[in-house]
Image (tube, rainbow, N blue to C red):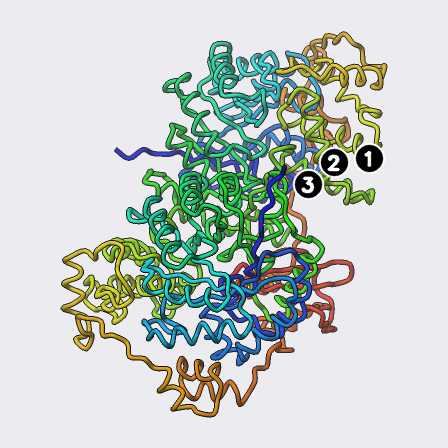
Amino acid sequence: MPQRLKIFDTTLRDGHQCLWATRMPTAMMLPVIETFDRAGFGAIELMGNVHFDACVRYLRDDPFERMREIKKRLIHTPLQGFIRSACVLGFDIKPADINRLWIEVLLRNGTDRMLAFDGLHDFDNTAPYLKYAKELGARTVHWLIFSDSPVHTDEMYVAKAHEIIERADVDEIVIQDTSGILTPARAATLVPALKAAVGDRSLGLHSHCLVGLPQRTYLEAARHGVDAFYTCISPVADGNAPPSVQTTAKNLRYAGYELDIDDEAIDQISRHLEAGITVLGKPAGRPQDFDLGQFDHQIPGGVMSNLIANLEQAGMADQLGAVLEECGRVRAELGWPIMVTPFSQHVAVQAALNVIHGERYGIIIDEVKLYALGYFGKLLAPVEPNVLDRIVERGSQAITLQPPEPEPAVEKLRKRYPDIDDEERMLRYSFPEDVVDDLYARPGDNLPPTMSVPFLHLLERLREQNVPTRIAAGGAEIDVELKPRANARRGAA
Amino acid sequence: MTRTIRIVDTTLRDGHQCLWATRMPTAMMLPVADAFDRAGFWVVEMIGAVQFDAAVRFIGENPWTRIRELRRRISRPFQTIMRSNCALNFDRQPVDINELWGELLAKNGVDRVYAFDGLHDYDNTVPQLLSAKAHGAQIGHWLLFSESPVHTDELYVRKAREIIDRAGVDELIIEDASGVLTPERAATLVPALKKEIGDMPLGLHMHSLVALPQTTYLEAVKHGVDNLYCCVWPVADGNAPPSVKTTVRNLRYAGYDVEINDQAVDEISRHFEEQAFLHDKPMGEVQDFDLAHFDHQIPGGVLSNLVSQLREVGLEHKLPHVLEECGRVRKDLGWPIQVTPFAQFLAVQGTFNAIHGERYSVVPDEVKKYALGYFGKHLSPVDPDVLDRIVERGSKAISLEIPDVEPAVDRLRKRYPGMSDEERFLRYSFPEEIAEAALTGPPVAPLPPILTSSFVDLLKALRNMKQGTQVFIQQGDVEITMESRGG
């Protein structure tokens, strides 16, 4: 009998996080949620930490409103949310009572499945809260974040799978490959090893298309027992993002697996997203070619585009190669932290400083010192001793050698804001006062009717061309009538 | 010691064959000939039968002039590829014509004359290879890769030995027209071949149809392949061989030396990017993996033709069905390699079968000839029931006994007394008026008129836009869709 596989959609979470800097407004999501609901997904992943940040700071979309409005329209498909380490929406470890309140708030607003991860695989940071979420009725999922390093062996992942099952009795384990470097060959050893460890629990795989590996790796992983695959709907798929569900479904079906995916529903959502791309001026994801360099630094796509922009701003774009090489070295010296938020950012910034200042670890960013001293959790491998000495000596002296115990904070928070709900309290706990004020005072202009600035620039250029031209952008059409001068042809820039 | 991996560039041969229907005129090549000379390519593959055909029929220029003009500007060794025993045609030609073909290529400055045959029947290729060798060329042979029950590592080892023994070739190349050689298969095939051929150079020439080349190239060089075939983007990727830039970056990252001059490659790349825009040519795009491709293995050029023909008759929706049927026909016919001319025959038969409902009720002449062995010995027999049907339903004008082909060179020389063999060869291969037009036209056909230079500025402005920004412009019945790849 053909094996049935599940597809989990993460367009609304990871897709636009990887391709659009997390800037998909709620208004673009709502018209297709009913279609998502009949597309046959095992679950829909919606909110990560970055989404709260983008909603509050940039889109001025109420993030809880997004969750509730979407949950209202999803009758059949569970909604997945997640927590990063014990940090709520910040980068440092938060008190236990705040983390528990965060779980309550997320579940109350429509999260059916609670996913957790920690870049150090220090489950002190996640196990208590997943257990709590399960007590409150959620299905629970934990990531094993894949990295190619001397530390991240199959044995380590097996030990970690056993540990999290034992400590939190999670329902599902997902291999998360933020750097997109899990090869078919490695999947052929890692997946069977994990499959034995997780027993009857579901084993998922969530990869990224940075170097073009997901299709072949998904096929190999399916062969060895992965039963749930994370994908996005093209055009908000591929590139830095997870693979396209269209391509993945085609390959898996061709290989003989059965899927519940409704192609017609997927096409409908795809067309909706395409129109959004034209209106919002956002990029579409494209298949990528293989790039061996990615295996060394393993920087995820979002951090990479930021790094390039920062170097360009500093007039040091030509140093990118050197910085990437240095990222590889820093990563090794810091004991192979997984290149996932926040460590990928820390490693990239420290490496850039090492290169730019000439002296390695001459300037130490606070986060690297905090990391090295164990503020974010236990390290999987020790920091190189000489580097550790230098970090402790050169880093901020305000950072104590012993991480302080975080104080309980919920009661104080409720006293401080007596007349608002816990949802708003959590936002006020996590963001500057004026930013949250702004969110509630001026809701976002969610679907800008205007074309993007580059397009206006093009219009300007076209006017200079003196060519009779009809220009169409999305649904809107603008006619520019000018004198003929040249023949136009099809091409691409 | 660090190993050096050599790069053979095939932009001027395979790149535009796969992406631009072989329509790159000589005039588009010459401005970057100097950059080709400096780019560090071990060899420049720059012409083959298809390029002769497109030059004469569609561009209206003399391909011998192209060879001479490029030869004057590029000092790197030139390479060509001869298709079976067909010279410039699609069916078998007399041995003396094929020998003349090998001789003329060698005499006109092509240093390396290589050959292939989709059945690996070397009776079809040895005479012209020996002729080229006798006239000073280095000779080599393709081993055409296919994923099938017939095309085992053992077969390739046996075929490598056979062509070495029969023609004394200087080099062998694994040619993967369908782009289906996986790293896993390369890990067994390459060592097996290396063991058989010893120190003889072994090349690998892939296509990016399902995005395998980068990982397979890395695996193949690990096991002893020493030269790799690439094209300069935008005449790379997609249906074409992989981009030289991506390949070189990966090779260097893996610790190999590659003697490529990046700046010269960039120069070529910018030139073709501009030409693609000005002359309405597509640019290669990186593809995703597609498992279905392994079944039919149709090369990109044939595939794009098939799609456009189905569209013309309003049957585009039948494509998946047609492709599936192509996979079945391939099996019925004893697994011929999906390469010219068999790829075309299979696509036509697959389409007939899928559309007429009854399989093999309409049989193209070429399929009957193939089944009867006109093109050479089969590696694996045609399915007996299918063979019966083909013989019965196919044209009765095709005799069961394969007729001999008469020698033709003497007659040709008598018919055209006062001219060179090069010219005679073109007159032999093309209808009189077409050959006449190409031979009497300007030595290098001028490029078609292009957009005004101010439009080029527009293009440059587009280049600075955010990645993915799409612009659609319509003027009369002309449309432009432009999309920025990001600044």
Q: Amino acid at mark 3?
A: Ser
Q: Quadrant of the N terminus of chain B?
A: top left
Q: How many numbered circles does the render carry? A: 3
Using the image, tell me which numbered label, if any, was put on residue B355. 1
| 3 and 2 marks in contact (CB < 8 Å) | no
Q: Residues within 10 Å of mark 2 (few under 14, many from 20)?
A: many
Q: In the rendered view, would you say B107 is above or below B304? A: above
| Residue A228 in view here | yes
Q: Residues within 10 Å of mark 3 (few under 14, many from 20)?
A: some
Locate residue B71, reporting x and y percent: 50, 33
Q: Which residue is mark 2?
A: B322
Locate residue B47, reporting x and y percent: 57, 31
Specify which label sits upstream in the sequence, 1 or 3: 3
Q: In the rendered view, would you say A19 is above or below B126? A: below
Instruction: Find residue A69 and report its image quarter.
Output: bottom right
- Residue at left offset 70%, top offset 30%: B344
- Residue at left offset 51%, top offset 71%: A107
Locate residue A50, reporting x and y percent: 45, 70
| 1 and 2 marks in contact (CB < 8 Å) | yes
**Are the residues under badges 1 and 3 in a single subunit?**
yes
Q: Amino acid at mark 2?
A: Val
Relative to B386, A173 lies left or right: left
Q: Which residue is mark 3?
A: B304
Which one is in front in this view, the residue at disc 3 or the one at disc 2?
A: 2
Instruction: Find residue B353 and report its image quarter.
Output: top right
Outermost residue toward the front in this view: A135
| Residue B107 in view here | no
Q: Could you tell me which secondary element the residue under label 3 belongs to? A: helix
- In 3D space, how far apart are the residues under numbered discs 3 and 2 (Cα atoms)? 13 Å
| Mark 3 chain | B
Q: Amino acid at mark 1?
A: Ile
- In 3D space, how far apart are the residues under numbered discs 1 and 3 (Cα atoms)? 18 Å
